[in-house]
Amino acid sequence: MRWEYRSEMVLFEETDEGLTHPMEWLEDAGREEWELVSAVPLVAPNPDGIAYGTIGIMAILKRALDGRAGNGEA
């Protein structure tokens, strides 16, 4: 099976309730048969270049090029 890959960078948003994540795009991607393969935290450096906090994620998604679902179903 051949796969198509894409990535999405998601930055957290600071609100009165704390940090939130805009993940509505993930439901839309699922409707287009994309599957989440991996997520890597995005860490921001302080002025000295030392990591001090996670600011979001880099999400990696895949879908089959031949139109079949990832579980082998047509």
Image (spheres, grey):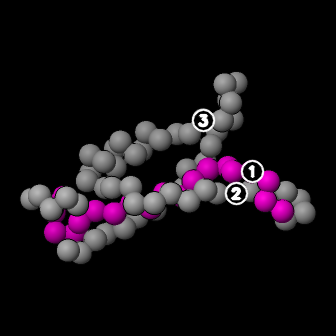
Q: Is residue 45 left or right of residue 56?
A: right
Looking at numbered disc 3 in the image, what kind of residue is underneath it? Thr
Classify mark 2: helix, strand or loop: strand
* First of labels 2, 1 by sequence position: 2
**Residue that mark 1 sits on:** 53
Which quarter of the rendering shows the N terminus? bottom left
Looking at numbered disc 2 in the image, what kind of residue is underneath it? Val
* First of labels 3, 1 by sequence position: 3
Q: Are marks 2 and 1 in contact (CB under 8 Å)?
A: yes
**Residue that mark 3 sits on:** 20
User: Where is residue 18 shown, x and y percent of the image?
Assistant: 68, 30
**Residue that mark 2 sits on:** 43
Q: Residue at x 74, y 51 (%)?
A: 53
Q: Specify start and end residues of the magenta stretch as a single range.
A: 50-69
In the image, residue 56 sits, relative to residue 24, either above or below, namely: below
Q: Residue at x 22, y 60 (%)?
A: 70
